[in-house]
Image (cartoon, rainbow, N blue to C red):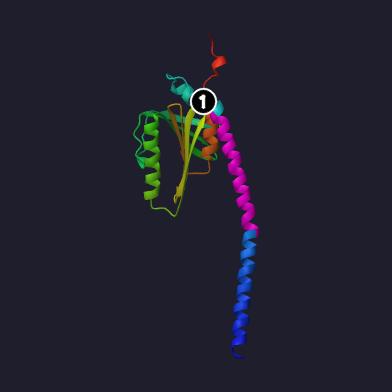
Amino acid sequence: MAGTRPAIKFVALGCTVILLLAVVWLLLAVPRVIDRTKREVVKQKQWVALTKSWRPPAEDVGPDKLFPEQVAGLELTAHDDQASVPEFRIELPGRHATYGSEQGTIEVFVYRATELEKEALFQRVRDAIDEADTTHRSIVPINLRINDRETSRLTYSFGPPDRRGILFWSAGWLFFARTTNDVDAEAFLKSYLEALSGPKEDDTED
């Protein structure tokens, strides 16, 4: 019996160490989780506010209006009508632009899409990421009804190599921003949509 006491003490010490490590981990992790949750709440409120005020561009909008020269500190470097995205099997006709700065580059795609086309496209994005050979992936779909208008948003990240993007659909328009570097795709797309938003009804001439 005496020979078992050191073993018991060792087990008790091991349990104490594990408990202390767990407490330390909680003390470090909980504030980060709370902070992340707060940021997501703020981000969601910003998107709701944007969606409420956002108005689609004119049906015949040209590339000069569709792609401002500068968005969120990034400069327009090129635009064309090559809007297919083989990675996600997106083949809708549309427009494509590239913005860049010292921070990096980001691509923007613009399509006209019905709700059914949007749903199919979102599913292709989810399927492609699920099937990709990656070590990490995150896909967050959000659907809202604001001002009697359906809107949808999907954000993703996966890798390596790291790829991040966001898709936003509203009023028959689908916008897709993606990057492989440090540009914040979600912040960029919000700024882009604000710059692109059409005039308010009471701002139009009779």
**In this rendering, does residue 148 appear at all?**
yes
Reading the image, the residue beneath label 1 is 196
Judge left or right: residue 194 versus residue 133. right
Quadrant position of residue 202: top right
Residue shown at the point (46%, 19%) measured from the top left: 58
- Residue 74 x %, y %: 54, 33
| Magenta stretch: includes residue 47 | yes
- Residue 89 x %, y %: 34, 39
- Residue 83 x %, y %: 38, 32
What kind of element bears circle 1? helix
Residue shown at the point (43%, 20%) measured from the top left: 59
- Residue 156 x %, y %: 47, 44
Magenta segment, principal secondary structure?
A: helix
Quadrant position of residue 79: top left
Q: Nearer the viewer, residue 193 or 4?
A: 4
Q: Residue furthest top?
A: 206
For the residue marked with disc 1, what is the amino acid?
Leu
The magenta-colored residue range is 27-51
Q: Is residue 105 above or below residue 36?
A: above
| Magenta stretch: includes residue 154 | no
